[in-house]
RNA sequence: GCGCCCGUAGCUCAACCGGAUAGAGCAGCGCACUUCUAAUGCGCAGGUUGCAGGUUCGAGUCCUGCCGGGCGUACCA
């Protein structure tokens, strides 16, 4: 439709002396229904070019358009309004055609082809296995999974990947924490000590690390080890077997949590792979060859000043251990080597600083850095009793994702993370969580869906059956027309949400659909109406249910038949 | 100090590539259930979009400078 109007306007402009080259009319859906179904600001943009008042230009375009003539089976009116907008109204025939298109597309309505033939890798969650997933990880997980689905619906072939590192200092401390707990179970009389500051004192076995992991899950892992593997695990004071056991147990938990959120990873990528394959050291050599790396003070430095930074940064510490930059660069090189056309990372705001180095790094290695993109989301602030909760996995002052789901449910949890723009700080009030879940907008959407299902069930009971050839021209009520117009928007909304990496656009849109349906429901009955009209309205209700279901599916939410 | 994000109704947040009268939910007040699901709907009230300039037909949106909050700015990841 936009293409058709765009062509028509350009033709109209030609007979007026022509538009500047490269000029493309822009359209938007006006917020105010009085402004028509589609609005074009071409006359405003061209005021300077034609040296005329925008309104006058708009009048001339309008006259030309009507003379073309404009296809009246699609457009019923052209109006000049405000400072010089051209407002178009769709004909009912066009709306009915759109409704038929939605029903024909069914479960695929909303898919588009922008990304056809292209492969995307979405990397998200990527929490190291040191403890249960927290509410903060939840935002990452849900955003990443939904972004992946949005890309799928935009035509991409998508893989979901979880990147982790089980070799660092954190993991060693994890192993030591489990070992200390295990030893205490083997010998209950073992010497203890008190750690922590005034707020969080804790009595622990003597060998427990000062900055060890304090959560209860550590003790559970230790007890399980004792029951299953006996009391002789600590042969040579080596935390390694404990680390391994902890990693396994924690990863199992993480996967269970992700499953509850309906998240299924296609692959887990261990950072160690990059060392085993020697990849990271090859990259250091490549940087050296390009004079982008050099030795100083026993460390290897990356010449980030060449990328416009104020100082160079360390790539490999004097201990021989790489900093995070090196494996990050190696990992992204690996992803691009695997042939992905788009590598999307989902990062918390605290990782923003690492991103430019990675981009500059892989670009200087000859990769197309434009293929790498990132979704940065701001932190989730937890509020309890009106006070912000400081979160730390080590200190066990966190709220787990599982606890959150236990309290408010999986759908509410997902929706919660999807209803706001990723780059706004999200405040989560735990005290209100449960209460709020009763009034959560997600129920509003699901309720609308369940209500449609209920109507269609009841219609069948009274002998009204769905008929393919119902006469849609009977849908003349303003709430019917408004609903159809709303339903037409899904493909555009999904495409734009994917493009801009903003899933919340879809949740906002679905709410508008639910509002439009509820208004239709309040004004137009199906059962008890004259049969032709009833059948036409059934088709409309069916289409509304389809749009809600498809949208909920993309967001990873259930679309219940009853509530 | 420097970099990124944010500042919109009492609270939590929307506002598509700069568009027309800045919108929802919650909280508050007032109505409406003989109805295909009231987990609802309708109405009222609530705003100098942090402040000051600039750009232009038009600015919550872009630019500059301030103010306030968050996150970074490690031979931590």
Image (spheres, coloured by chain):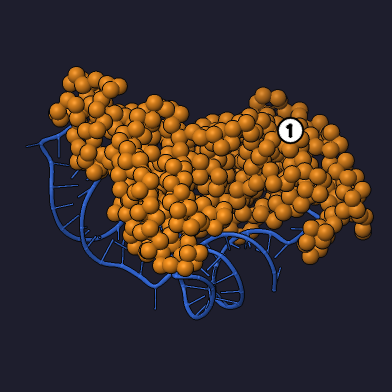
Chain colours: A orange, B blue
**Residue B45 lies in quadrant:** bottom left
Check disc 1 and report its element: helix, strand or loop: loop
**A84 or A436: nearer the viewer:** A84
| Image location of residue A355, percent across then percent down | 70, 51
**A221 or A256: nearer the viewer:** A256
| Residue A282 appears anywhere in the view | yes
Q: Quadrant of the N terminus of chain A?
A: top left
Q: How many marks?
A: 1
The residue carrying pointer 1 sits among few (fewer than 14), some (14 to 19) or many (20 or more) residues within 10 Å by Cα, namely few
Q: Viewed as shown, does residue A317 lie left or right of A266?
A: right
**A313 or B60: nearer the viewer:** B60
| Image location of residue A414, percent across then percent down | 47, 40
| Residue A210 appears anywhere in the view | no
Vertical relation: B23 (above or below) A511: below
| Image location of residue A53, percent across then percent down | 41, 67
**Residue A333 lies in quadrant:** top right
Q: Viewed as shown, does residue B36 lie left or right of A358?
A: left
Q: Quadrant of the C terminus of chain A?
A: top left
At x 19%, y 26%, the residue is: A532
According to the image, label 1 marks what residue?
A: A338
At x 73%, y 38%, the residue is: A336
| Image location of residue A20, percent across then percent down | 54, 58
**A256 or A307: nearer the viewer:** A307
At x 55%, y 48%, the residue is: A500
**Residue A470 lies in quadrant:** top left
Vertical relation: A154 (above or below) B72: above
Q: Viewed as shown, does residue A519 lie left or right of A42?
A: left
Q: Viewed as shown, does residue A177 lie left or right of A557?
A: right
At x 33%, y 59%, the residue is: A81
Which chain is mark 1 on? A
């Amino acid at each position: 439709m936009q293409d058709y109007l765009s062509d028509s306007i350009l033709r109209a402009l030609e007979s007026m002396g022509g538009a500047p080259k490269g000029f493309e009319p822009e359209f938007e859906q006006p917020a105010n229904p009085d402004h028509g179904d589609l609005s074009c600001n071409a006359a405003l943009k061209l005021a300077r070019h034609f040296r005329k008042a925008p309104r006058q230009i708009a009048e001339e375009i309008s006259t030309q358009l009507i003379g073309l003539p404009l296809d009246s089976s699609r457009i019923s009116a052209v109006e000049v309004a405000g400072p010089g907008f051209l407002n178009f109204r769709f004909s009912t025939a066009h709306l009915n055609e759109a409704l038929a298109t939605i029903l024909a597309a069914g479960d695929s309505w909303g898919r588009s082809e922008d990304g056809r033939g292209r492969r995307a890798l979405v990397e998200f969650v990527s929490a190291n296995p040191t403890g249960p997933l927290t509410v903060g990880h939840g935002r990452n997980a849900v955003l990443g999974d939904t972004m992946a689905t949005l890309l799928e619906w935009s035509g991409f072939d998508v893989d979901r990947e979880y990147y982790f590192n089980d070799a660092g200092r954190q993991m060693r401390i994890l192993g030591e924490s489990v070992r200390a707990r295990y030893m205490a179970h083997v010998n209950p009389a073992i010497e203890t000590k008190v750690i922590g500051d005034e707020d969080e004192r804790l009595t622990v076995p003597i060998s427990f690390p000062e900055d060890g992991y304090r959560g209860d899950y550590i003790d559970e892992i230790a007890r399980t080890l004792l029951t299953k593997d006996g009391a002789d695990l600590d042969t040579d004071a080596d935390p390694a077997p404990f680390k391994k056991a902890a990693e396994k147990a924690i990863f199992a938990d993480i996967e269970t949590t992700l499953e509850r959120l309906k998240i299924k990873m296609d692959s887990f990528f261990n950072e160690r792979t990059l060392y085993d394959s020697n990849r990271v050291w090859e990259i250091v050599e490549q940087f050296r060859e390009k004079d982008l790396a050099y030795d100083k003070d026993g460390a290897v430095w990356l010449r980030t000043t060449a990328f416009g930074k104020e100082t160079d940064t360390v790539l490999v510490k004097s201990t021989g251990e790489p900093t995070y930059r090196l494996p990050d660069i190696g990992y992204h090189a690996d992803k691009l080597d695997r042939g992905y056309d788009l590598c999307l990372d989902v990062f918390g705001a605290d990782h923003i600083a690492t991103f430019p180095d990675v981009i500059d790094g892989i670009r200087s290695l000859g990769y197309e850095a434009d293929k790498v993109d990132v979704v940065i989301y701001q932190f989730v602030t937890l509020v309890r009793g009106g006070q912000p909760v400081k979160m730390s996995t080590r200190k066990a002052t966190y709220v787990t994702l599982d606890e959150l789901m236990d309290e408010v449910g999986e759908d509410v949890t997902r929706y919660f993370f999807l209803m706001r723009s990723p780059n706004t700080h999200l405040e989560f009030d735990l005290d209100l969580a449960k209460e709020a879940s009763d009034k959560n907008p997600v129920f509003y959407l699901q309720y609308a869906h369940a209500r449609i299902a209920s109507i269609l069930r009841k219609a069948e009971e009274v002998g009204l059956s769905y008929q393919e050839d119902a006469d849609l021209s009977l849908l003349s009520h303003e709430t019917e027309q408004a609903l159809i117009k709303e339903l037409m928007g899904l493909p555009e909304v999904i495409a734009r949400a994917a493009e801009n990496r903003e899933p919340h656009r879809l949740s906002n849109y679905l709410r508008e659909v639910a509002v439009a349906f509820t208004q239709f429901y309040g004004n137009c009955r199906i059962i008890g109406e004259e049969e032709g009209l009833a059948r036409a309205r059934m088709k409309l209700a069916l289409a509304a249910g389809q749009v809600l279901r498809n949208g909920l599916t993309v967001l990873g939410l259930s679309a219940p038949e009853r509530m």
